[in-house]
Image (cartoon, rainbow, N blue to C red):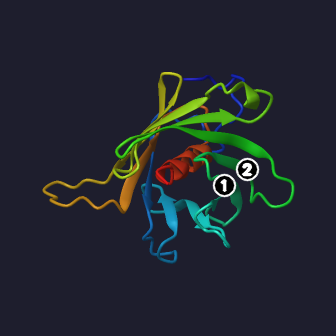
Amino acid sequence: MESETSDWPYTATQDHHHHIPIDLFGSKKHAGLPRGILSFTDASGNIVFKVHRQPPNPSSIKLLLDPNDNPLFSIHRHHNGNWKCYKGSGDGEKEVMFEVKRTVKTFTRIELEVIFSGERLNDDVCDLRVIGSPFKRSCSIYKNTDLVAQSSLMYKLNQIYVSRGKFRLTIFPGSIDHALIVALFVIFLNGRK
């Protein structure tokens, strides 16, 4: 993993001195939110991130918000299967943070390449790679060969039917912003479209 003094463009806004993985729990059923709003909570059940759809075309624009409804990222889907993520709400002057390109799409597998904005955007050098199955809510996010984050469904012992409505996103220690990882996971969930 990268050290704190690296030239990596996005560092964690949370306390990045943690040396243990952090689990976020995703669901569209949270007591404090209207039904259908995707939220990510910590182990205590406190909302950490929320995802809102933006009208008039709710399937192509999503806002990643902090617990106080401040926009962190505006996520835009393009018709060619690519995504662009802008800083803040994306209103007015839009600052592209990163672009996501879908490189593999099969019924059971999707692969995405993440390219951060800046001078290297046209170099098509992949900064992160997302690999997994949106149907199973299962993916792994890699920076080179290092595992940055991983998601999975919430299984219980002796459970016959596993609900796809609740899942876990584990973010491993490093220097990548947790909001950025959640934004990539939101793109991954919608990457099959």
Q: Which of marks 2 and 1 is in front?
A: 1
| Residue 124 sits above or below residue 40 on the image | above
> Could you say which disc has been placed on residue 76 in the image?
1
The one of 62 and 43 positioned closer to us in this rendering: 62
In the picture, measured across the screen, residue 60 lies left or right of residue 168, that is: right
Spatial CA span between label 2 and label 1: 8 Å
Say if 182 sits above or below 147 in the image: below
Say few, some or many: other residues with alpha carbon within 10 Å of mark 1 (under 14 / 14 to 19 / 20 or more): some
Neighbours of disc 2 within 10 Å: few (<14), some (14-19), many (20+): many
Q: In this view, does 112 lie to the left or right of 58?
A: left
Q: Residue at x 62, y 53 (%)?
A: 79
Name the residue: 66% across, 33% down. Answer: 115
List x then y, in percent, for residue 136.
33, 50
- The x and y percentages for residue 111 are 47, 37
Name the kind of residue labelled 2 in the image. Answer: Tyr
Local SS, label 2:
strand
Image spot of residue 176 (x, y percent)? 60, 36
Q: Disc 1 residue type?
A: His
For disc 2, the marked residue is 86
Q: Is residue 44 visible in the rendered structure shown here?
A: no
Please report whichever mark, 2 or 1, sits nearer to the chain's N-terminal start.
1
Is 146 drawn above or below residue 177 in the view shown? above
